[in-house]
Amino acid sequence: MTLKDKKLLYIFLYLLSFGQVLGISILVNKIEFIPIINNVMLGLSFLVFLGLQIFFINRILNFKFNKYLKILLGLILIGLCLISMAYLFLVFAFSGKENRKLTYYNENFYILNVGWMDPIYEVYRKNFITMDKLSEDEIKNTFDDLKEIEDQDTRDILEILISERESFDEQGEDEVAKTGLEDLDEKENFEEKENKDEILKNFKAEDAIKIENSDLGLLEVDRAGARSRWFLVRISGNKMKFISELEETSPKVSGRMDDEGLIHLDFEDINNNKSNYISRNNGKTFGKIK
């Protein structure tokens, strides 16, 4: 093999190290492999990438050319390798799957936490080396006897998933029933607002956390352990006017109003998990930013 052929081969192997990583990443995101297969593929891909990088750098630097150029090239290649490895480690870490296996009436299932910060669980039915995701209705209909599941954590997760589905169904029925109750709802909302105005009488304007660039504030009206109850209020001198109650219960919060009049709230719980909300209607309602 000539020197030129060797150089071309080494360049091909260098590019292959990136190509196989990209291919594996696409593959595990397109096909739902069972956790052990998924994680082994990611691990082997990472090791192959590292091996090809080391082989290429070693071979290239063994060629005879300018000493200073060789040092510069070596530093560049090693730097690219380290940056790529750090990036791949993060990507593969998020692509990895928890091996929480469940056997239910001779069928094998996996319960995966697909959330990055907050836990979000999905249930899959195992095939051979792949698995199929169960819909909410399939989860409810499949796991109709949770007493058969011995693991308490698994049982709790399924109970939550099933109860959320039942709660959604009940909400759909409630929407139909609410058609003739609008006047009653308005009355209840008026009474609820009066009650919250009474709560504000127990606090001073200085107790509220000011929202930057506005006359608004966030007032902690109650706390139970690591959970807080927050009111959004309008501050005028020493008086406060109730605007809305926030669904978020994290104890740490800061807020600001941007130039377009949008209100941004940043919450942080005791585990340093952060969540962000935005209001486009002067604080009457807030939407969570995904």
Image (cartoon, rainbow, N blue to C red):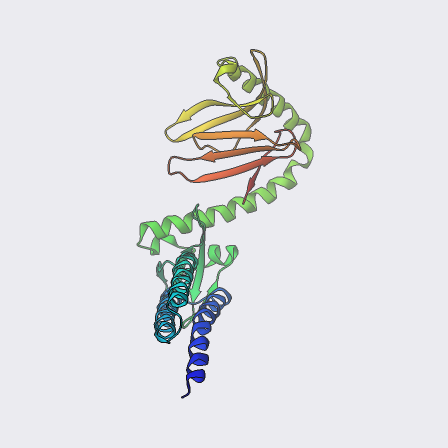
The quadrant of the rendering that contains the N terminus is: bottom left
The quadrant of the rendering that contains the C terminus is: top right
* Residue 245 position within the rendered picture, expressed as x and y whole percent measured from the top left: 55, 27
* Residue 220 position within the rendered picture, expressed as x and y whole percent measured from the top left: 47, 23
Q: Compared to 262, does 40 lie above or below?
A: below
Residue at 64% across, 34% down: 280
Residue at 47% across, 34% down: 267
Kindly indicate the quadrant of the structure image that contains residue 6: bottom left
Q: Compared to 59, does 179 lie above or below?
A: above
Q: Compared to 202, does 88 lie above or below?
A: below
Kindly indicate the quadrant of the structure image that contains residue 45: bottom left
Name the residue at the left extreme.
150
Residue at 36% across, 75% down: 59
* Residue 30 position within the rendered picture, expressed as x and y whole percent measured from the top left: 51, 66
Q: As rendered, which of 231 and 2 lies closer to the eye?
A: 2
Q: Compared to 136, does 200 lie above or below?
A: above
Q: As rendered, which of 145 and 91 lies closer to the eye?
A: 91
